[in-house]
Amino acid sequence: MELTLWTYEGPPHVGAIRIAASMRDVHLVLHAPQGDTYADLLFTMIERDGKRPPVTYTTFQARDLGASTAEKFLSTLQSAYEHHKPSLILVADSCTAELLQDQPGTLAETAGLPIPVVPLEMAAYSRKENWGASETFFHLVRAVLAGQRSEVSDRPDRDGVTRRPSVNLLGPSKLGFRCRDDVLEITRLLQSVGIDVNVVAPLDAGIADIMRIPEADANVCLYPEVALETCAWLERNFRQPTIRTVPLGFGATQDFLAELAGVLQIDISAQAVADCRLPWYSRSVDSTYLTGKRVFVFGDGTHALACARVAQQEMGFEVVGLGTYSREMARDVRAAAKELGVEPLITDDHMAVEQAVSELRPELVLGTQMERHIAKRLGVGCAVISTPAHVQDYPARFSPQMGVEGANVLFDTWVHPLIMGLEEHLLHMFRDDFEFNDHAAPSHLGHGEGTLMAVEDNVVSMPRIRWEDGAEKELKKIPFFVRGKARRNTERYAEERGLTAINIETLYEAKAHYSR
Amino acid sequence: MTAEVIAVSEEASERFQPLQERGQRAVFCGLTSIIWLHRKIQDAFFLVVGSRTCAHLIQSAAGVMIFAEPRFGTAVLGDRDLAGMADCNEELDRVVAQVLARRPELKSIFLVGSCPSEVIKLDLDNAAGRLSRAYDGQVRFVAYSGSGIETTFTQGEDNCLASLAAGLPIATDTEERLLVVGTVPDIVEDQFRRLFQQLGIDAVDFFPGSQSTDLPAVGPNTRLLLAQPFLGETLRALESRGGRLISAPFPLGAEGSEAWFRAAADAFGVEPQTQDSVLSAPRQRAEAALSTYREELADKSFTMLPDSQLEIPLARFLSRECGMTPREVGTPYFDARVMEAEVPLLPEGVDWVEGQDLDPALDRVRAVRPDLTVCGLGIANPLEAEGLRTKWSIELLFTPIQGFEQAGDLAELFARPLRREQALEVGSWS
């Protein structure tokens, strides 16, 4: 048993629903008790879907337990087929049904439906939502393409006129982070460099689209959490290379195009990304105030990794913490953290994340909706970069994270919660100003949003070291957003030298020591 | 007295025979009640023993209500627990210790059973007894089931209160005391207290109260007044302790509130003149507040899909006090005893449904196209996208709607979607 207050991911069958809901003409019959239908509201409320997700739940109750739950599954399967007439049915257990061992997959085979039925094993007691999505997508693609064994030679030669190179975009799904807009942006980018998008899946794909997947020259693994397993299988069975660079951030978008150029053996002009404003915005003088801002990054593996790179290399921030709740991508995140010289945080316990944020004292948190709440409590600015996200993170406007426009969006979104350049200096100069002080929010943000006041209050001093009055007063003159760091460094400096009290001298000696 | 009540019930159930529907249900499970129960009972923690689905359900239903640190959580069962590699009781003890280490001020922990814990037959009653002894009365442990295989949505509160009812102190009062049963928002509780006091009924307890240690006593002199229409098990548990029900419609709307207070006043022998003088002013205020919305709602039709058990009293309120026309009203289950005073007030010509079969029910909504459909969160936007106006029903549990002073607010909840349709000049609902 594991105590969970809030969870980053839902159970695996929610991942299965995400795949079904992303596609056309696919229906999921879920063997699940009454109550599990809450999953509908994730789609209709958070993503504002105008349709119920295509899932029929058996909603068995206590009185059905025993022999009749299996019958209930079969009758639900039959009526779901008749009512919805899908082209393909997925069947799965939710956590409770898994315990009943009715084996809906085997039962479904006996139903004799005239359409493909794909059984899924959701491993509810060891796996989670993204795994469930990945597994479902993989089994669906494999079932549809079973029997097809296309060779590279089946794909007609390209002469640049009759057939342009083409790729599939795999992984975008419902309840992913800005998938709809990323697909538009990456499609536009690929078109601009002469590459066609053959199939996008699972988002908006039908079974006929899945059947056309082998026609492309390569697969772009846009969201590895959902599509990596499928891409690997396609690589093995259809010799379709996988493009692994996720084009999130300016540098990553360049790398993505370079990888495509290499794999497809075509020339791609650097002009493709020349329109991106991020590089100039980041170099413009106003942005010097971004230099070395302490940033904490946490999210799914894909977004955390890409955003850490953007934060460090493209915004000039200092990444002080990096973590993910995606255990599947723990290895990559550990490697990236090592490169950045920070401790990796691989956890799905939001209390551990809160602990890390309050200890690291960042000036900006890039995270999920959980970190938004953590940041709000600690009074630190926050931008959401990853699921789980709430309704406001499914904006009406075009707001991709990937590609050229995605990089522009990242710049704007991450700068917004911060205090602007000159404002920061004025806060320092006139810190006792009655309307312009530690407790005032950035002028462009409303009351209560992004206030930094709580940060200082959360400092846990080492009790064995005493601050003399003068030193304590001097500390207060240091801008509040770095005061905690100054306090901590000074205490560490004093401790290392066996001092029991800190005076003004100690404070400035420590400052000199750490600024080397 | 008892014979009389049964006679009323039989008459009511003869008149009221909802169509039984069995099929796919789109309702929350009883765990969802924790969202308001944990705010009401302020020294308690609700520990669900269940799966990741349970944890995900509560946080999804709670939506944006992410509090500093919630007083609820899930002990998520893993493969090791199911394979018997870990002793579930030891694991539970460890998780409880973890909760108490973080929140040492807690006075009660509810061990809440879920679908998986019931299927594997984890005995939480036993665990609650063992833990109560282990913590030597410092922390009270109470077990109940909020599982979807046994409960829908508001039945979670019913089971919670029923299990608390078994442990209430024995009342030794020689005078009758009033026990108001069911979670109502604090502001409503305060209004109710004032009115009971003005009626001369001073001996009033509310159950549940804000402190789990402050439990009302119950005995033969306890008169029970239900504030919520989903507390059948709690009622039976309190009756088995000697409590006696005051049969009344529920305090929704001006009429419902007046009938509710008058039923209590009659039971406590309050003179009719006193009742009139105390209740006439709030009744008039409620009528005045309702009148504006009545104009907007009159002759509008509505369908209610099964959700919270509030459907029957709300249908009564909307038809009698707002002039609306019910087309179909579904309720997860029908408890004749709890609804006995409501049934005689219900309009004729309504399709009453008990239980649910979602797809055919939605097809009927599409065919009837009522002016307003009251439904769960998962269904509201899809119906809106089909050009139908909806009122999501979970708000009816999270908003103060009971009593005279909230009668207007209650009508407003139903009027707002229709008002919005009038206000917007983008898109189309027609």
Image: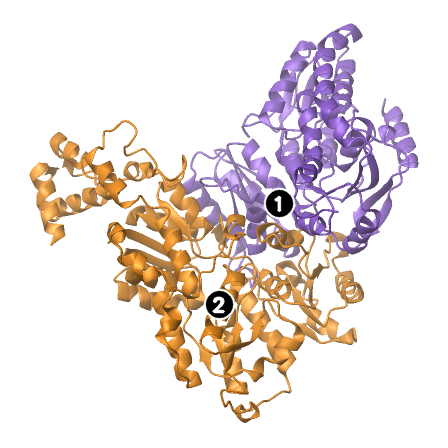
* Image quarter in which the N terminus of chain B is found: top right
Residue A354: x %, y % from top left: 38, 48
Return the residue found at the far bottom. Answer: A153
**Dot 2 amino acid type:** Glu
Task: Name the colour assigned to chain B in the rendering.
Answer: purple
Residue B30: x %, y % from top left: 65, 44
Numbered disc total = 2
Residue at figure coordinates x 50%, y 70% from the top left: A187
Circle 1: is it few (<14), some (14-19), or many (20+) Cα within 10 Å? many
Asked whether, in this view, residue B247 is left or right of residue A165, the answer is right
Task: Name the colour assigned to chain A in the rendering.
Answer: orange
Disc 1 target residue: B31
Q: Nearer the viewer, residue B43 or A458?
A: A458
Disc 2 target residue: A225
Residue B146: x %, y % from top left: 64, 45
Q: Is residue A369 above or below residue A108?
A: above
**Dot 1 amino acid type:** Leu
Residue at figure coordinates x 87%, y 46% from the top left: B19
Asked whether, in this view, residue A440 is left or right of residue A386, the answer is left
Q: Nearer the viewer, residue A391 or B306?
A: A391
Q: Chain of mark 1?
A: B
Q: Nearer the viewer, residue A204 or B85?
A: A204
Does residue A499 appear in this view?
Answer: no
Residue at figure coordinates x 89%, y 32% from the top left: B12
Residue B388: x %, y % from top left: 74, 46
Circle 2: is it few (<14), some (14-19), or many (20+) Cα within 10 Å? many
